[in-house]
Image: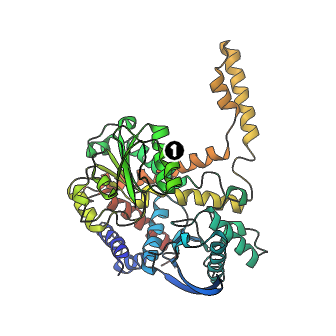
Amino acid sequence: MNKFLLDTTKYVDKALKFTNLSAGLANKIITCNSTYTVRFGVRLRGKIFTFEGWRSVHSEHMEPTKGGIRFDMATNAEEVEALAALMSYKCAIINVPYGGSKGGLKIDPSMWDKRELEKITRRFAQELIKRDLISPSMNVPAPDIGTSSKEMAWIADEYRKIHPADINGAACVTGKPENKNGLVGREEATGRGVQFIIREFFRNPDLLKKVKLDEDLSTKSFILQGFGNVGYHASKFLTEDDGVKLIAIAEHNGGIYNKDGINVEHAKKYFVKHKSFKNYPKADFLKDSSLLIKRKCDILVPAARENVITEKNAADISANLIVEAANGPISYKGNQILNKNKKFIIPDILANGGGVAVSYFEWVKNIRHIRFGRLEKRRNQLQLNSLIEAIEDMTGKTMPKKYKDNFANGIEEIDLVRSGLDDMMIDGFQSVKKVFLENKRIPDFRTAAFKTAIEKIALSYDFIGL
């Protein structure tokens, strides 16, 4: 069995010991419902290339099922199954009404130009659509490693061609461009969710005692591993909004360190241009970036991919708080070592749920066929302006312009999206915290998170008579 899938199953098995589920139901929850393998040919560069891809459905306790599609040479069927399982648990924790799914295509996107990549993506989409593995009512993909809003737009267009009469066709995939039925805030969503989870952690003194930190987030430092979409947005929001100091960024081909802090935007522009941090002028470059995650800091944020922290390096981790912005960045054995060393881990199935939360909002928007806030914005502005006038009349003073302008703008769609995301992340965090603190036998926050998710899924199965 693939190590990632095996580790995911071990985490679930550990949590099951703290539930009253029957062996049969427990096995049903663990077992992936189905995995489809598709192989298709595409004529490119004067010859036919054959590609292999997968779409896995872990659980249909709620439908549609939800999960990204990654384009990656390292992907395989069992990795996709593990990721689909994590999606089921992730959705359950933050109360997104989806089952878990995931997709993968064994391809290196950098080897193909945009026109070729579009042709490959559309062919892959065709194979999945005709099997109902892309559908607004049954299975809804989103971007993942190697894919973006561009690929999602191609997939949505392919669905429209095959099902032109489906009025809800735009909801067949999320993470689309904003001007192609996408949702403002979706691209930043996973990173924004990581920020909200860290904020919420620092509002809980009973948990802060466990990591020996105070509640002032602005005095903390963090190290980021993985500077892709999730890592970039998480670090941008934490530094700009909360004043957390980013002291290191680790990437696959080297990393940078500056104890006085790194400017996220400056580092991003340099990395995009040079594809590497080598010779970066405002920090020290380390070719072996794996050394960076061992440096002393308050918070470590692994935001790239699975098995970054294993039994080989877990004992060297200095940070007392680890927030899993990636899927499965800590192996099971690595997790055991970190727990033994009293490191507090906010697991992936909670910390990186922001992407699926805002994907849900996008799906709802596509089903409703109206943007959030459309009906109430002007009414809201009128009420706020009336309130300002009443306050000024009663006090005889003029409200400062900065407050008045803020009120006058009214509520935009992005405000509603971020508000909804914050609410879902806080609810998820508090539900896990409740389980963690009420049962003294539960050894760590990850186990509490899996227990929370498993019991919610079990309840859904119970209601449908399983």
Which residue sits at x=75%, y=33%? 382
- Please indicate, yes or no, whether residue 441 appears anywhere in the rendered image: no
Which residue sits at x=50%, y=44%? 266
Residue 463 pos. (x, y %)? 51, 71
- Please indicate, yes or no, whether residue 267 appears anywhere in the rendered image: yes
Q: Quadrant of the N terminus?
A: bottom left
**SS class, disc 1:** helix
Q: Residue furthest right?
A: 165
Identify which residue, 243 or 459, lies in the foreground: 243
For this view, does 398 lie left or right of residue 283? right
Q: Quadrant of residue 351?
A: bottom left
Q: Is residue 413 above or below residue 187?
A: above
For this view, does 83 lie left or right of residue 410? left
Residue type (three-letter) at the residue carrying disc 1: Glu
Q: Quadrant of residue 6?
A: bottom left
Residue 167 pos. (x, y %)? 76, 69
Residue 302 pos. (x, y %)? 38, 56
Which residue sits at x=71%, y=16%? 393
Q: Residues within 10 Å of mark 1 (few under 14, many from 20)?
A: few
Identify which residue, 375 or 279, lies in the foreground: 279
Q: Residue furthest front?
A: 279
